Image (cartoon, rainbow, N blue to C red):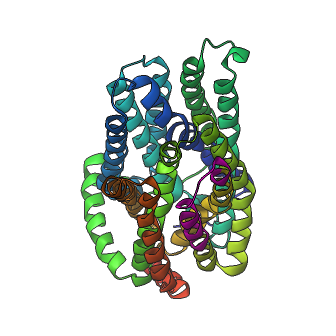
Amino acid sequence: MHIGKPAPRRRTLAWAFYDWANSAFATVVIAGFFPVFFSQFWAADLPDAKSTQWLGYASSAASLIIVCTAPALGALADQLGAKKRFLLGFTVLGVLCTGALYWVGAGHWLAALLLYLLGLLGFFGGNIFNDALIVDVAEPENYERASSLAYALGYLGGGLLFALNVVMVLTPSSFGFADKGEAVQTAFLLCAIWWALFSLPLAFLVPETEGVGSKRLGRAVRDAFAELAGTLRAVRRLPNTFLFLIAYWFYIDGVDTIVFMAVKYGLDLGFSDSSLMVALLVTQFVGFPAALAFGRLGERWGPKPAILLAIGIYCAVVLAATQMQRVEHFYALAVAIGLVQGGIQALSRSLFASLVPDGQTAELFGFYNMVGKFAAVLGPFLVGSTAALTGEPRLSLLPVLFLFAIGAMLLWRVDVAAGRAAAKEAGEGH
């Protein structure tokens, strides 16, 4: 059930600061330095195709593990009232593994890959329970604003740390580093410290509603799986919630694939790694005000029309990317992506939160994250397969256009008002 009174502003801000904290991992590690450093330092002795293959395997493996465990973990967290404890546990895993990359030497690509995989698990797993905590810090009418604030802070926080790291890597001697490699390794350590430090407001200031009841762990596990089976049936009885999840599966597949593959795509086109880092910075800093603006747009139009607008812009970006010739074009597309990436993620989270019955938030956000991570398995695979079959990197993005189109058509059919009414009725009977 929801907290009785509107949550104080500091609770919402403390919750939103977790996005500021863990977005450093998404920016510095996933999108930024790890793919390049893995190929050029840890796996420098492997052929390019081989290092790309192993990097893809690690990303897919982490996503598959979350796919298989997220709903059950979410159900267990609902039973125990332990969303925050689960979140902090995954955070500790992610922080330790990210920091440990600092000590991995050249050529030890398998150790680096294992730490990366575990770091991804910490990042993905923490997001399940952070998403679910939105109902404990904001009232339904404020979901769009709270979610957009969190994504905006994520872009700003991740962007600030990434900006510092890029300057470190481009001018290592100015910071007392021997070379670029030492600067990048230090960036991983700083990312871990940042993630840990800015998770503290959530740890101390964000409350959590109680679980279904006070139970022993064994009983809670049994009840969690029983509830999970019930939730599968319940979701089928919430047709608009179910339809939204399918739509989200397709369009967030496109979003996540662009995040995972953008740097690799730019490298394949012959752009320098420093140019690609600058483009990522552009996306981060454009994303900060844009996520806030999309939150207001979601309040004025409703989240569904705003998400459809974002999908349309993504489709234009994909079409333009297939014709890209110069690095300036890459910068322009980075601006376009920054305008919509935070908005589509924030409004998707807030829209889904409004379609979820009370008492099942962590469990259903487990499904929500499962859908997103399963998409992250399929999207890069489709892009890689298309590139292998055609031999042309530009054509590899075309399946992403197809995914956005399917997602938009399905989302168009979601009746948000009916879905919210059904969720409210189901929550009252839960």
| Residue 285 is covered by the magenta coloring | no
Q: Is residue 209 visible?
A: no
Residue 171 appears in the rendering: yes
Camera-nearest residue between 167 and 141: 167
The answer to which image quadrant residue 140 occupies is bottom right
Q: Quadrant of residue 139?
A: bottom right
Residue 105's x, y, as percent? 42, 16
Up-down relation of residue 383 to residue 56 (above or below): below
Give the main secondary structure of the magenta stretch. Answer: helix
399 vs 156: above or below: below
> Residue 54 in the image: x percent, y percent?
32, 38
Residue 234 left/right relative to 152: left
Of 106 and 145, the residue lying toward us: 106
Magenta-tinted stretch: 311-330
Where on the picture, by quarter, is residue 234? bottom left
65 or 171, which lies in front? 171
Determine whether, in the image, residue 82 is placed left or right of residue 21.
left
Relative height, residue 260 to residue 226 (above, below) = above
Tell me which residue sits at (64%, 57%) in the image. Answer: 333
For the point 47% across and 86% down, the residue is: 413
What residue is shown at x 50% (from left), y 25% (from top)? 99
Task: Identify the residue at image location x=43%, y=31%.
Answer: 39
The correct choice, above or below, for 77 with respect to 192 in the image is below
Q: Any magenta on residue 316? A: yes
Please state, as top left, top right, bottom left or bottom right, where the C terminus lies in the image. bottom left
